[in-house]
């Protein structure tokens, strides 16, 4: 369903989702061309979670994210050119090329830390939530992590304190499952957690916990805006699990693009290889959102086409900018090192 928002806001959500998709498909291309090396993860398939979810936060709220951070940063308004430069290890990146894909951080947007240490951010989020509560600043902390983070001891320890101290923190657990399984809410997804459904874990710590379909932008928006309202009212931590089906391009260790995305795939899948058609037909959150926008008569196909064209231009310029940016100078290697 569509989020209950104005036409302008819905178009903006669509633009941000397309921006993430085209950014990451470009990133994969650049990697395949040998323009950067090292491992990286993409957010493709989860755009209808991050974009509507982060739109529910205020400008002063704190955020923490993980190795799958690109989509979160772009959803919150990061500039594609500076993010891409960072991932490519260039001087004009947000962290002067020293953070890279795993640790890109944009503090001006409220992100205090991005960590590839699975669950490493969950206790940190408890820290900023504690500080905000002590200072009565009204800020909340959004802690974004994957289903795998619940396996780490840091998660239950943090839930315990957050619950006891009624900390203003939103736990958003993106359960990205496995291709072809667990599309339905509550259906058995692949999990290595004995506590199942995953919401059993926060619920044991008396943290209200809800599961939503992470490919349904309207459901995500409704769940997160309600959770954020409760946190702001002083009701303490809230946990939302969003379920998505893993993008088949992320099945192997190195992402591959089975078919370049364009909005027209929402109605015509003839260009999509048979092996992955089911995902693009049933599980691609952007194509679902685009169909809802057009079939709900919010926008025309032509209007979406124009939005996508602009996004494409922005990504092409971002790639030019990032590739032209120099690597950091050797003499700066020890700058910003604290220990
Ligand atoms: C503490 C720790 N253990 C193991 C790893 C290796 N590792 C990197 S990503 C990952 C899977 C994380 O799964 P999940 O949190 O569900 O995130 P997803 O990649 O599915 O979005 C693991 C085990 C790590 N980075 N940190
Ligand atoms: Mg996962």
Image (tube, rainbow, N blue to C red):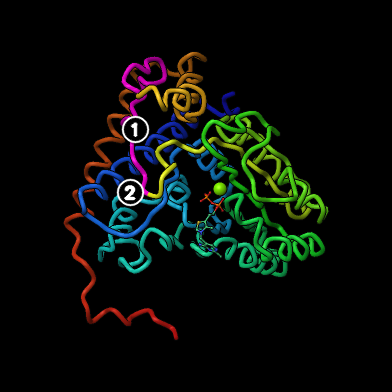
Q: Residue at x 47, y 57 (%)?
A: 67
Residue sticking out furthest to the left = 324
- Of tags 1 and 2, the one toward the viewer is 1
Q: Is residue 334 left or right of residue 123?
A: left
Number of residues whose C-alpha sits closer than 10 Å to that of mark 1, classed few (under 14), some (14–19) or many (20 or more): some
SS category of the residue bearing label 1: loop
Indicate the position of residue 265 as horizontal and vertical percent values.
37, 21
Write down the quadrant of residue 196 in the picture: top right
Q: Eyeballing the image, is 67 above or below 335? A: above
Question: Which residues make up the magenta segment?
Answer: 254-272
Write down the quadrant of residue 184 in the picture: top right
Q: Of 7 and 97, which appears nearest the observer?
A: 97
Counting residues from the start of the chain, the first of labels 1 and 2 encountered is 2
Indicate the position of residue 76 as horizontal and vertical percent values.
47, 48
Q: Is residue 281 left or right of residue 316?
A: right
Which residue in the protein does label 1 denote?
Answer: 258
């Amino acid at each position: 369903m569509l989020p209950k928002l104005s036409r302008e806001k819905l178009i903006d959500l669509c633009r941000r989702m397309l921006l993430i998709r085209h950014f990451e498909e470009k990133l994969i291309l650049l990697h395949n061309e040998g323009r950067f090396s090292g491992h990286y993860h993409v957010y493709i398939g989860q755009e209808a979670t991050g974009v509507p979810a982060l739109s529910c936060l205020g400008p002063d709220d704190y955020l923490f994210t993980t190795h799958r951070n690109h989509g979160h940063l772009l959803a919150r308004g990061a500039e594609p050119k500076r993010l891409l430069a960072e991932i490519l290890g260039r001087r004009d990146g947000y962290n002067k090329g020293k953070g890279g894909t795993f640790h890109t951080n944009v503090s001006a947007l409220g992100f205090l830390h991005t960590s590839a240490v699975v669950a490493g951010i969950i206790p940190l989020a408890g820290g900023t939530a504690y500080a905000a509560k002590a200072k009565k600043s009204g800020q909340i902390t959004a802690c974004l992590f994957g289903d795998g983070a619940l396996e780490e001891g840091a998660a239950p320890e943090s839930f315990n304190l957050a619950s006891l101290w009624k900390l203003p923190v939103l736990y958003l657990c993106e359960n990205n499952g496995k291709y072809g399984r667990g599309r339905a809410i509550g259906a058995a997804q692949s999990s290595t957690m004995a506590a199942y459904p995953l919401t059993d874990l926060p619920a044991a710590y008396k943290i209200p916990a809800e599961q939503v379909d992470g490919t349904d932008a309207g459901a995500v928006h409704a769940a997160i805006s309600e959770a954020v309202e409760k946190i702001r009212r002083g009701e303490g931590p809230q946990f939302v699990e969003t379920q998505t089906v893993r993008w088949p391009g992320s099945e192997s260790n190195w992402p591959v693009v089975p078919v370049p995305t364009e909005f027209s795939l929402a109605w015509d899948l003839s260009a999509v290889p048979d092996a992955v058609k089911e995902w693009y037909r049933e599980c691609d959150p952007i194509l679902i959102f685009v169909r809802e926008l057009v079939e709900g008569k919010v926008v025309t196909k032509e209007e979406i086409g124009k939005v996508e064209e602009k996004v494409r231009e922005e990504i092409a310029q971002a790639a030019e900018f990032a590739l032209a940016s120099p690597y950091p100078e050797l003499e700066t290697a020890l700058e910003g090192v604290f220990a």
